[in-house]
Amino acid sequence: KEFSFIFVDDVDSFLKTAKNIDKLLYLLGFSQKDLESAMKLIRLKEKRNKTEEDWKNIRELSETVMKIGEKKMGVLVVSSATSNPRSNRIKLFRELLGFEVGTPTFYLRNVVDLYEEINSKPLEEWVKFLGKGGLLFVPSDRKKEFVEEIISYLKEKGIKAVSYEDLNESTLRDFEEGNIDLLIGIASYRNPLARGLDLPHVVRYALFYGVPKIVISLKFEQNISHLLWALTSLRSLVAKKLPHKLKELDQWLGILKRYEYLSEKVERLKKIDTLREEVGKFLSSKEIMELIQTCEEITLRKTEEGYQMVVSDATGYLQASGRTSRMFAGGISKGLSLVLVDDQRAFKHLIKKVRWFNEDIEFTKINGVELENILKEIDRDREKIRRFLKGEEIPESKEILKPVLIVVESPNKAKTIANFFGKAIRRRIGEHELIETSAEDRYLMITASLGHILDLNKEEGFYGVYITQKPVPVYEVIEGKNKIVQSIRRMAMEAQEILIATDPDTEGEKIGWDIAELLRAYNPNISRMEFHEVTKKAILKAIRERRDFNLNLVKAQVVRRVADRWVGFEFSKLLQYTLGKQWLSAGRVQTPVLGWIIEREKEHRKKIYKVIAYIDEIGKLKVDWTFDDKKEAEEFYKGISEIKVELLEEKEEIKNPPPPFSTDTMLKSASDIYRWSLPKTMEFAQALFELGYITYHRTDSIRISDYGINIAREYIKEEFGEEYFHPRTWGEGGAHEGIRPTKNIEPEELKALVLSGQIEDLKKEHLMLYKLIFNRFMASQTRPVKLRIYKLKIEALGKIAEIEIPVQILQRGWDLFLPIEIYMPKIGTIDVSQKKKFISGPKAYPYTHGELVKEMKERGIGRPSTYATIVEKLIERGYVIENKGFLLPTGLGKKVYYYLKSKEEVHEFLKEEFTKKLEELMDRVEEGKEDYVEILN
């Protein structure tokens, strides 16, 4: 018999037997053959080292299974609390029903976080003041016996408390009725009181008798996960104070990460024992002990069994304090958490770590709030919940969680946003994935468009534009995107509201506008959601402050796309016909840039000659003379034996830092320092943005918001002191910011989290780019550097040069992040007979990626979103090759460029003047100062 509705309450028990899954699917109308097809697909997807034949079979089977999925006759609802099923057959739900059974965890929290010193008043006074309905948590480093001691102590003071070990229906009923004042547990996410208690009408506050802690023994006999914790906690400190130990520490982290989940039997292997002994000796060494004692976030504790390292347990705190704030028919109930601080270092560590989970958590000293008013609000919520439960009051007819569809561009960004609000759940609609979570009063359904959905038609009108009295661009769904459109339309019908959260630039605005037009017939309640950093705070702000689409940005993108299509298609067609190669292309930006590369190579072929002399002891400070004539250079080289260095002036100078990165300066720095190509840098920046580590990376702006300045204040004050912080906005107004980190997390700490496996999806190159961005930003918010400067006159064989060099740092500032080279010149007559060089070289070196992007920025062609793609296209077409970081034109590139240059009627549209003028007009369209139709005409 087939059922149209099936509800499984205790899904954990139900799924213990894999056959139950099959029975359930039979009841929904599937056959044994259907299940076999789906299982075959599951096994193929899991196969490692897939062949071409495997991929072909996956594609074919996916089509088959999708059709099978359409025949389901009913609806299945499952209720799960802790389910993490291991059977492979659980994946049948994903393939046939389009959802995964898992444990969604939502971080819905309305808690006032307070603290006070533990000795400020006796424990019983706090309990009596806060009243009944309390949960008391002791740190996990205290034994179970301590819980019993507290229960006995409170009993003497007239307070009835029960241990978490004695919880049962009877004690919970007594607690509910007020016969028990307090339940006592351990501040750990594993403790039943912290994770399994759900009494929203009773629990009012959480009282932490000591900071929640993790204690790590520094004895080498301990388990692998403790060693991993210890090294991760110490890594950023070691990087600053003992950098010579860093390489060895990172090797240990890599090995420990691989062995972390091994069984005790495997942990006893000789190789593991040797590693454990090495790490143990390192941790108990004198220099590490001294290092820990200097750290303000780690406590070193000596016991009879040896030394212990103590840090906070942020997860335990959030889990336990979360019991005080629960969802109910009227919203999220208010709760209170009070930490009685027994360890200042652990508390400082807790303050920092909880903000990883929730940026909004701020600990306030208890005398800084109106505690009685807060308790009244808490009691009002409890009374309301009790009345709802008894049926004495009917909740207002409103949805607690309003379903909202958010469409972003990339799956990475969708995943990052969902993770801010807990452990999300996933399901599939059609062939497209939907990630679901909740935030404040909204149930968020997040999906990705995978970039542009529409593009200009290639057949209609003149390359996709009807030429009438005014041009009419004709758009169509890009090949392969039809199924995405169908899936997102189905998602739109499930939502009350749609928020389009594509990138905050002209391209993103156009992509978003296209999506909105495709969905409007299915759900007209559509708004634009804009954010410049993928952080929880920015996402919530963007949801609350949604706006209409900016049609000026959309029109500017239409002008860009039509211009690219007309110029590109028309002249590419000409090239392909004339030169007989179908892959050739021309473009209004790529062609002038190709011309620059060719002209620079001409300069590269010309030779110049240099004589270099060193005027300090260590060969760091040099002066050089350039000659076009080889003979003249050789004579100068032979004749120079000494140099006269005269100190013309000694002065003090205040030097300000460089501004934060914009796209062009980031690309140039990455090219200069790491020799990265533009596409490579943009790929790493894109990932850092989507994963929530940096602000939007396609920007001309260097402006910094108040929020960004606060991140710098927090870090600089903590690391160096308040006097080093020097806030700068670097510009006024505007939505866009410069490129900066989104969190107060230093590069070495981020690397430690990656090496230990706490953060995934980041590679070495991501960390390198993050370090570049972090240091540049922090430098921009640090005080100026005071330097002693020498102005020198250098004379040799009648040739005179003047230079200014820094010789001493009088007051440190931004050089803490971006070191300044200091020189020690010799004054007077210097013998350079053994300290001179004669070299020949090119008059100009070929462009590097960084120099080329600087040239584009200065000449006003290209945009932050197109710098990398321009160079990428030139390389793809075979017009340019990269050699040791330099960009060189090929024979084909020269042939194409000179052919186009010879056609006067064509060349006019491929000159940089045309593109520069068009870019200026597009800026005016964005500002609403030009009519895009007039420009196209």
Image: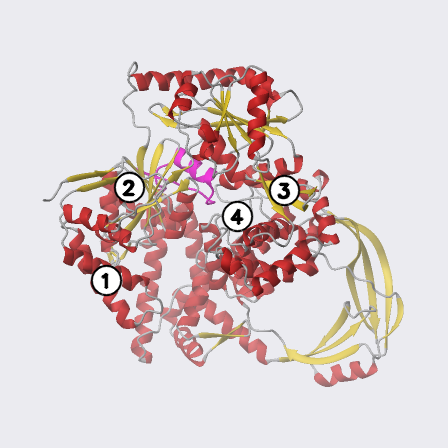
Which label's residue is closer to the chain start, 4 or 1? 1
> Which residue appears at 35% of the width and 61% of the height?
564
78, 263: nearer the viewer: 263
From mark 1 to mark 2, how far is it between C-alphas?
25 Å
From mark 3 to mark 1, how far is it between C-alphas?
50 Å
Which label's residue is closer to the chain start, 1 or 2? 2
Circle 3: element type: strand
Q: Give the percent coordinates (x, y) of residue 397.
A: 27, 22
Near mark 2 (Cα within 10 A), the count class, few <14, some 14-19 or many ≥20, is some
Q: Mark 1 points at which residue?
A: 40
Circle 1: element type: helix
Q: Is residue 10 visible?
A: yes
> Going by the picture, which residue comes out furthest to the left?
1
As drawn, is 448 to the left or to the right of 148?
left
Q: Mark 4 points at which residue?
A: 701
Q: Name the residue under label 3.
A: 310
